[in-house]
Amino acid sequence: MVNKIKQYPIVLIFFIFLIGFSVFDAWYPKRPFSELENRTLQQYPTISLSGVLDNSWMVKYEAYVKDQFALRDNWIELKSLSETASLKTENNDILFGKDNYLFKKTLAVNSRFDTNLGALERFTQRHAGQVDVMIVPSASTVLTSLLPAYAPIANENEYLDKIFSTVGSTANVYDMREVLSQHSGEYIYYRTDHHWTALGAFYAYEQYASANGKPVFDRGASEAVEVPDFYGTSYSSARRIGAIADTITYYNLSNVMTVFNTQTDGSVTQETGTLYDTEKFATRDKYAAFLRGNNGYSEVQGNGEGSILVVKDSYANSFIPYLTADYAKIGVVDFRANLTKIDKIMQDSGYDKVLFLYSFDGFSSDTYFGSKIASE
């Protein structure tokens, strides 16, 4: 037996490695959150008979093993290095574009799209003339010249057309494809992140303010602060070797923002501060500094007249500071942390209008959207 094993040393080494790594992986500390990927990691799922029978426990367990794999971040880096060395054009569903841009690979639009569009249509019918809709195209739809050749990207344009045609008779729609395409040679989307930059958001805001007869935010009258060394969500997924860091720009405004936090017992606490949590600029998730993160419901004191309620995903976080020039009160709702339906917020606070501002991907995949804008 010993002689046979000696004939195949590579097999012995493999089994020693496999057993050793299994022990190491079991011992390796489990993490609740990945700072690199900026997301909550799957924890060991509670086992139950129903979970075993319907396979839901196994699905969660597979996610747990994937998320908690020992030295996960190091393996991602090693995979990225090998992908780069082999001249491949993608890693972990992130496409390597020209000029160091990283694009999310999307083969199909999320199945939630039709559900969310139907809910939006019914909402605009209930509040005809009071609703504005701005669904922002992804970087891959605007910066097409920077995509790798034959990139597998779903056609957002036909879905954006469907959104605007569906609600165009009951809402004011703002199609940002043309204005963003006019500035496609400028720094309007981050290279390493899926968000648009403050400049991209400004071009969209400029068109929105002008269409509503509002004064346009004067960028020259406010201090522009630059925060370097930002590596965003696309970089976290791909870990592309040689990626160039982004720079975040924000305007140092004195406007007050109040965040309303609903506790588990139903009580509400308030936290008042500026529009930015500047401490976040010192962390990996620098974009979370805008509007102090994605809070359920917040109110911003503006310098203009009237009021507006912005229902949004994180794309709106760099857009909303510009609205301080136009409105006296700006309500902000993020369904990921909000417990109240929009009709009730409108009724209680008496907002003049509602703006739905989402990225296309955010609108298509929001699992809370339909229930939160449904009628009471």
Image (spheres, grey):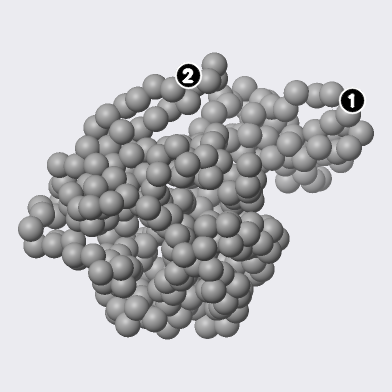
Element under disc 2: loop
Between 260 and 125, the one lying in front of the other is 125
**Image position of 9 with respect to 313: above or below:** above
Q: Which mark is residue 9?
A: none
Name which of mark 2 and mark 1 comes first in the sequence.
Answer: 1
Look at the image and tell me in which quarter the N terminus lies: top right
Residue at 10% from the left image edge and 53% from the top image edge: 223
Q: Residues within 10 Å of mark 2 (few under 14, many from 20)?
A: few
- Between 77 and 7, the residue placed more toward the observer is 77
Residue under the point 28% across and 51% down? 306
Picture coordinates of residue 43, whole percent (x, y) = 64, 29
Residue 86 rendering spot, x and y as whole percentages: 53, 69
Task: Identify the image quadrant of residue 271.
Answer: top left
Image-based side of 111 in relation to 319, left or right = right
Question: Given the image, on which type of amino acid does mark 2 rest?
Answer: Ser
Residue 267: mark:
2
Given this view, does label 2 or label 1 mark the residue nearer the observer? 2
